[in-house]
Amino acid sequence: MPTSQPAAHGPGRPRSGRSRAATLEAALALAAEVPWARVTVGAIADRAGVSKATIYRWWPSRGAILVEALAEANERDLAYGLPDTGDLVADLAVVLRGVVDELADPAWDALLRALTVETLLDADLRGRVLASIFAPQLAAFEVRFAAARAAGQVAADVDDLAATELVVAPVFHRWQQGSGPLTHAYADGVAARAVRALSPRG
Amino acid sequence: MPTSQPAAHGPGRPRSGRSRAATLEAALALAAEVPWARVTVGAIADRAGVSKATIYRWWPSRGAILVEALAEANERDLAYGLPDTGDLVADLAVVLRGVVDELADPAWDALLRALTVETLLDADLRGRVLASIFAPQLAAFEVRFAAARAAGQVAADVDDLAATELVVAPVFHRWQQGSGPLTHAYADGVAARAVRALSPRG
């Protein structure tokens, strides 16, 4: 059944679609239930009903499994792109309020904290996050900024990467540092300031 | 010689100023020379010529020693405040170019990466960074923003914490993610966008 097989991501024969899906689901479920320190490859294998050998054939680490699972969830979230009501500040505020809500969930906070730690220490994992999570997010921002540029709301010479970082970085910085409250009002302010920074001159 | 004694930071008798300085110097020197994983409390004690028991009487962890050492270095850097030439974009660009230069040094990159990891996992250390490094930085930004506000360059209703994060967060976000080049041109662009975002309307 070649049509049901996902493309091979590693060496050797293609992954079974069913084992792959079960592994990703198990990693996400465990990560939401227990501290990340306890989400071992063995625990993921048990939960998925897949052997550890099978998992290690396709992923080098538990971090790589989680990144792939989060990338799939992220792809589903971005399937219809960022909101586009024509009001750029309001649309970015919706996105940032969603991030703030996510970070307020203790299970997600702990999970993202653990994943951030691993990406800081592991260049391979950092590359996976960049390619499979950040790049699709950047692509969604590019589409939204292109529409805003056509509407005269964003300057023609704005770099989409820098613009995207301007929108998301303050929220993640505050989350990491614990320097202030992560509220919807804060999200709204970040969106408003970013759009002012990006708007055409004069 | 009470005047040469620093204030007690922990329980029991006050720290010897000499042991304290030797410990902080040893931590900074080791952190610049060897990977952070090898900068144990024992190695710091050996280098400083101080017993491990003495160190543990005053600091709960190697991370706490490093944060205190970095906080002192930071205080010296900030002794004269942020640059104030009257040109806010240029002054913030000088600050961000300095950050970019620091992050380009592989030893500093590794050290800050390791320290970021520990602060993500250790709420006590996060509190120490916030109180002893971030708070003095914020205070320096507050002084510079107050001057800019008086000169009509920053809106009266701007929150200094949010404004500071707007300036520094994009650089640290790009550093952590590896999402793009960390150049002086990028630092200049971040400074220019931040000042546009903060400027009074109309």
Image: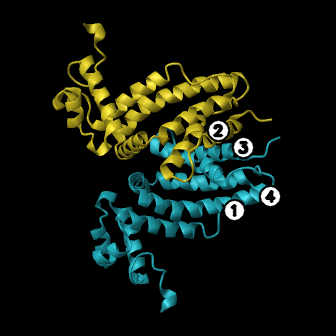
Chain colours: A yellow, B cyan
| Amino acid on which the number 4 mark rests in the picture | Ala
| Amino acid on which the number 1 mark rests in the picture | Val
The secondary structure type at the circle numbered 4 is helix
Q: Which residue position is annotated with label 2? A: A188
| Amino acid on which the number 3 mark rests in the picture | Arg
Q: Is B124 drawn above or below residue A5 in the view shown?
A: below
| Amino acid on which the number 2 mark rests in the picture | Asp
Q: Which residue position is annotated with label 4? A: B150
> Mark 2 and mark 3: span between their CA atoms?
17 Å
Nearer to us of marks 1 and 3 is 1
The secondary structure type at the circle numbered 2 is helix
The chain ID associated with circle 1 is: B
Can the viewer see residue B35?
no
Q: Which residue position is annotated with label 3? A: B196
Badge 1 and badge 3 in a common chain: yes
Q: Which residue position is annotated with label 1? A: B143
> Mark 1 and mark 3: span between their CA atoms?
19 Å
The secondary structure type at the circle numbered 1 is helix
Q: Residues within 10 Å of mark 4 (few under 14, many from 20)?
A: few
Q: Pinpoint residue A140: horizontal percent, then vertical percent.
A: 54, 25
Q: Is A196 drawn above or below residue B76 in the view shown?
A: above
The secondary structure type at the circle numbered 3 is helix
Q: Pinpoint residue B184: horizontal percent, then vertical percent.
A: 58, 48
Nearer to us of marks 1 and 2 is 2
The disc, 3 or 4, on the residue closer to the chain's N-terminal end is 4
Q: Residues within 10 Å of mark 1 (few under 14, many from 20)?
A: some
Badge 1 and badge 2 in a common chain: no
> Mark 3 and mark 4: span between their CA atoms?
16 Å
Q: In screen coordinates, is A134 left or right of B189?
A: left
